[in-house]
Amino acid sequence: MKILGYDLSLKRSAGEPVKPGSSRQRSALAVRLINGQVQLYSKTSDKLISESFLKNSDLYAVVMYLLRKTKRAKFYLYEVKDKKALDDYMLLKGEGATVESIAKASALKTKALVATSNTQIEKLLTTPNADQGWGEFLEHAIAYKLLTGERMIHKLSGAWPVSQMYILPPTLVRVEGGDRFMQIKEFVYTPTQQVIPVTDIKFSKTFYPALGGTGNELRGLSPLQVMALSIQKSNEGYLAGVKQFANAGPPGILTFPDADMTPEQAEEYEYHLQEKQYGQNRQLHVANMKADWTQIGLSPVDLELMKSLEFDLRTFCRGYGLDSKVLGDPTSSTYNNMAEARKAAIVDAVVPEVEAMAEDLRAVIEPFNTGSKQYFIDGDVSAFPELAEDINRIIERNSKMWYLTPNQMLEAAQYEKQKNPLFDEPWVPSGLTPLSEYAAMSDVNPNQQPKNDGSY
């Protein structure tokens, strides 16, 4: 019997491979319903990373954007000069910071901190260990925190209190709980089962609520776990698009009303049809007989896959505190909106990561603090070009406030103060003359109140 030119009496030989797309080939479902509940990816960090960061281009772009921006920050060593000013400085740079508050913080920095030198600490900030330079070390430290919600800095002592520091992959470290709530007994590096004392690791993590008494509160909550369903939906959307292109159109059912085929003949015809479709020509042979086509799938346009993927990108960006416009979301992507979105990304997402990294580094160098001397590692965020325009506007505004001293203006512009005492008194606009000299030339006592002679 022949259908569309195929002789269904011809059987395939035993062991002949089934062509892609054949009904004989079935793939495992990525999503299953168990008791009415959607089963997500495994909650383990390694599985989450492999199914998201390593597979989903949108999520990869979000994480890499933050990683590249954060790596621009520089970390410098200081000594604490004024504890009260330091508290104010950290408050202005902390949660809820704005471009203006960051500029004000820079003005306080010279009062709170003084640049210092320590060979041992500075070596850690350039060559943290024998295998990595600072750039690679910082990249690993930031990336693991973004992906797992955890950062583990392994401190090695030697001739110095801290001679080297390594970033341990949280995916390869087991946290052993102690007898008390929130107590960590020890860490275990699983590839070698090496036990690492708690004092040898600076462990920072995001909040994970205690659920079920399983000890999950000892670990950090990965953003990927919270966004797991959106990640899976996005992956399936991309996969659906690939399948539609691979199959050259939406799937359907081909029926022949006038043909009397047995189930075996129908299956045999399906094989030949798939073989022809997936051949080099990718064309169907059409014979002169009546046939009906019933579409059972939708095209990528009908499924609105691209719009759905845009929503997924926005979800990933929100999860990391970004505006999706910085990653090419076409919605309202005007020049002004883009500029504002980039500034917001630095203030809302990048600066907090820099501050968290600086805080961990300060904990690492704590053993170097002896006597009354207190070292302080600070992340400099003034080099971000996204903030430069706003800082320039602040400088321009301050330049019109003649009652500010030149040193105050220098601090606002993030420059060092001048030692000349004249820079600590206001300059009047007329020729930018010091106030004391201007009063002398005008024969006016600056401390004398004007008298009312009736002329006004």
Image (cartoon, rainbow, N blue to C red):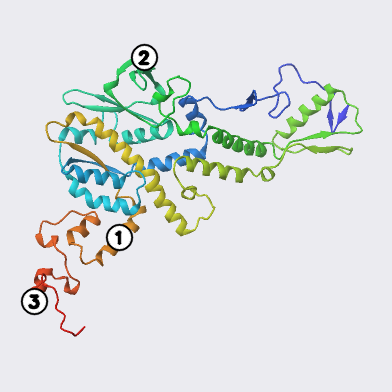
Secondary structure beneath label 3 = helix
The Cα–Cα distance between marks 2 and 1, rounded to whole angstroms, is 55 Å
* Residue identified by numbered label 2: 193
Viewed as shown, does residue 71 lie left or right of 288? left
Displayed quadrant of residue 398: bottom left
Which callout, 2 or 1, points to the residue nearer the camera? 1
Q: Quadrant of the N terminus?
A: top right
**Which residue is more in the foreground, 176 or 330?**
176
* Residue identified by numbered label 3: 441
Which callout, 1 or 3, points to the residue nearer the camera? 3
Q: Amino acid at mark 2?
A: Gln
Q: Position of residue 83 (x, y in %)?
A: 19, 42
**Which residue is more in the foreground, 28 or 410?**
410
Circle 1: is it few (<14), some (14-19), or many (20+) Cα within 10 Å? some
The Cα–Cα distance between marks 3 and 2, rounded to whole angstroms, is 81 Å
Q: Which mark is residue 394?
A: 1
The furthest residue to the bottom:
455
Q: Position of residue 267 (x, y in %)?
A: 80, 25
Q: Amino acid at mark 1?
A: Ile
